[in-house]
Amino acid sequence: MYDAIVIGVGGMGSATACHLARRGARVLALEQFDIPHDLGSSHGISRIIRLAYWEHRDYVPLVRRAYELWRELEIAAGERLLVVTGCVDAGDPTSPNIVGVREACRRFQLAHEELDSAALTAKFPGYRLPSDVVAILQPDGGFLLPERCVVAHVEAAQRAGADVRAREPVLGWDVQSDHVRVRTNRQTYAGARLVVTAGAWTTSIATHTLGLLTPERQVMLWSQPRVPEYFQVGNFPVFYIRVAEGGFYGFPIHGVPGMKIGKYHHRGGIVDPDTMDRQAHLDDEEVLREGLRRYFPDADGPTLGMKTCLFTNTRDEHFIIDLLEHDPRVAIAAGFSGHGFKFCSVVGEILADLALDGGTRHDISLFSMNRFVAS
């Protein structure tokens, strides 16, 4: 019998398997697709990491720990997984991201610089934001390489003795008197604890989350800049800008040709992860071209690539990280709402704590599943 079984080996599950195995647990990690794969939320070459967290103050201590753990994983893997570029948050002076970033920088004494639009363009010519926009540059921001992060966590887990199996979908699980039983398309396994990190498939694996999670189709675009030097690492920080059209995010050229841009809640709509349209289309491109033309015109060259991915949203866009109330042998981490990947390293540590110790030193009260019952 395993000490813990992890269902889903994307960003969160791979980190969880790694932390469990490093603590001496006998771990089975099950993935229905390949490792890594491009069908969920842990792909696309780059994912933003930032310290100045505007969504809620409770994220900042967690992302500080995440940075430490990513650096430790880099050393173990012998490769670069986190690229520091600086991070720009921009918007109207009263917009939630600007108000929140200012508060985070003040509360946690984070290094930052506040710039108007002209000063931002003078410093980083790729940016051409409206004159009434405020920008806050936080130098510690950057991006992670998600596919490589998943592989690094899996390989570290395997070196520590974890049993990792891909292309093995879970058909169901149930709680027995002294163990949790998990059935796959290949066989049945027993574990003392169960951790569900199944992303957009969480509700099909754990019906306890019915009504709490909304999978949403997202699209990423890589565009050939007209002035490539403006969009190189070192000249172009990652960004989140809140403008009239919505929230755009993006990255410098890295890994594949082109500057990358996406839009939060791209075109809206709930999808089934098993049947969603995984092709990117011209109308998807136009949504992102609008952001390029208006705010990054020197990047508005030919399209070099597009990919779809999934957000799995909660109602308040905060995570779910919790033990099941009626059976604390089962932990669930889900609903990372398009901003979770940067936390994979620390969420893996938290889930290992919950599975092995029944609690964690990290403050995860914000992520209680019961908050939705109360509301």
Image (cartoon, rainbow, N blue to C red):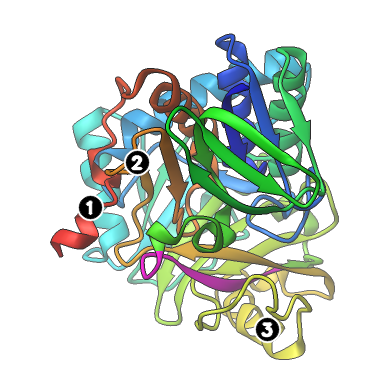
Res 85 seen here: no
Residue 217: percent from the left, percent from the top? 60, 74
User: Given contact means CB atoms under 8 Å apart, are the residues at marks 2 and 3 in contact?
Assistant: no
Q: Position of residue 279 (x, y in %)?
A: 79, 78
In the image shown, does 203 or 269 lie closer to the viewer? Answer: 203
Q: Which residues are magenta?
A: 210-220
User: In the rendered structure, are the residues bearing label 3 and label 1 in contact, judged by CB atoms less than 8 Å apart?
Assistant: no
User: Residue 266 appears in which quarter of the rendering?
Assistant: bottom right
What residue does disc 2 label? Answer: 322
Mark 2 and mark 3: span between their CA atoms? Answer: 35 Å
The quadrant in which residue 84 appears is top right
Three-letter code, disc 2: Asp
> Where is 9 relative to 286, above or below?
above
Q: Quadrant of the N terminus?
A: top right
Seen as rendered, the residue at the extreme bottom is 283
Estimate how packed mark 3 is, as few (under 14), some (14 to 19) or many (20 or more) residues with alpha carbons within 10 Å: some
Q: Residue furthest front?
A: 177
Amino acid marked by disc 1: Asn
Q: From the top left corner, tell me how far across and down residue 6 is, in percent.
A: 60, 36
Look at mark 3 in the image and give the residue it sits on. Answer: 284
Q: Which residue is mark 1?
A: 370
Is the Cβ of the residue at disc 2 closer than 8 Å to that at disc 1? yes
- Position of 233 with respect to 304 (left or right) is left
Q: Quadrant of the C terminus?
A: bottom left
Distance of label 2 from label 1 (alpha carbons): 9 Å
